[in-house]
Image (cartoon, grey):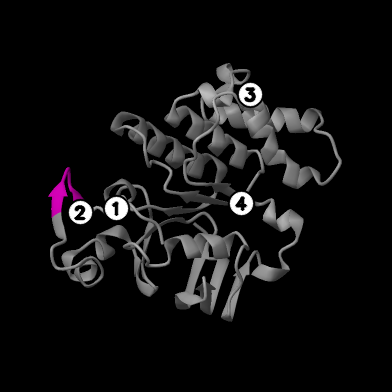
Amino acid sequence: MTTHPIIQFSQASFSYNGHIALEDLTLDLHEGEFVGVIGPNGSGKTTLLKALLGLIHPVSGALQIFDCACQALRCEHRARIGYLPQKEKIDPNYPITNEEVVMMGRYGALGLMKRPGKKDREIVADALDAVDMADRKDRPFAQLSGGEQQRVLIARALAQRPKILLLDEPTTGIDAPTQSRLVELIQKVHKDYHLTIVLVTHDINMISSIAETILLLKTKLYALGPPAEILTKQVLSPVYGEEVIVAKRNQQPYIIVHDEHHHA
């Protein structure tokens, strides 16, 4: 990992629906870093993603991405930020193939009114291959399983040729074996593409074994550091409550908190 910050929050505060949702955030995220973002309902996790996507701007302080203020990011900058949204229901009758879904990832780089060329089709083919979906490129997207759809949506993000990949609850609503394979894929993509990954999740145990850095939010930055330092009862209890349980399983911390399947 290099030491160059790719994302810099400087005393940044963000408002959502008229309320401060994230306050006085100061931190650097570096090129190639894998960051897991955790925190209870209402802690600012989704606000953080909205800020990184340029959907909201700081009401005070500053956010810089690629050495630009977030509100100054041009189209070519935004195209370098890949995004996997929370899982959505797709109309099973909507006629779009997996290849066409992934090609959407090229539109930001192509610009308006330009048709995809040979290079774009090669990038799409590479992205589908990277997520082991090349043999299903002509299948309707809506007919895939949840795990397969997530793979195709990761390929869509990869087709942007991003430097940053944002993942919002990527394993929600997927069975445990499929979750495990998806987590392995995310690790592989991180390594092969040298991406900076920011993964927001309510599933602390999923992220604890793959993130290099854990970012714990409670409207403010409550803690930031390696999983071994953050995932302790001493650090988690003030955020999740005294009833949080921190155990060990397979030499990894195993955390039990109230299931709060809601989003901040």
Q: Distance of mark 3 from mark 1, alpha carbons? A: 34 Å
Q: Residue at x 19, y 50 (%)?
A: 254
* Residue sitting nearer the eye, 110 or 161: 110
Q: Which mark is residue 163?
A: 4
Closer to the eye: label 1 or 4: 1
Which mark's residue is nearer the viewer, 3 or 4?
3
Q: Nearer the viewer, mark 2 or mark 4?
A: 2
Q: Earlier in the sequence, mark 3 or mark 2?
A: 3
Q: Count residues near mark 1 (Cα–Cα under 10 Å), then give few for <14, some for 14-19, many for 20+.
A: many
Q: Main secondary structure of the magenta part?
A: strand
Segment colored magenta: 247-254
Which disc, if any, is residue 204?
1
Helix, strand or loop at label 4? It is loop
Q: Secondary structure at mark 2?
A: strand
Q: Does label 2 or label 1 sit earlier along the sequence? A: 1
**Mark 3: secondary structure:** loop
* Residue 129 in view in this figure: yes
Residue 41 percent location from the top left of the image: 34, 62
Question: What's the distance in space between the residues labelled 2 and 4, CA to CA?
Answer: 31 Å
Pick whichever of labels 2 and 4 is earlier in the sequence: 4
Mark closer to the chain start, 3 or 4:
3
The disc placed on residue 97 is 3
**Could you tell me which residue is drawn at 75 percent across and 33 percent down?**
120
Asked whether, in this view, residue 26 is left or right of residue 83, the answer is: left
Dot 4 amino acid type: Lys
- The numbered disc on residue 179 is none
Residue type beneath disc 1 = Ile
Q: How many marks?
A: 4
- Residue tagged 2: 255
Give the residue type at disc 3: Thr
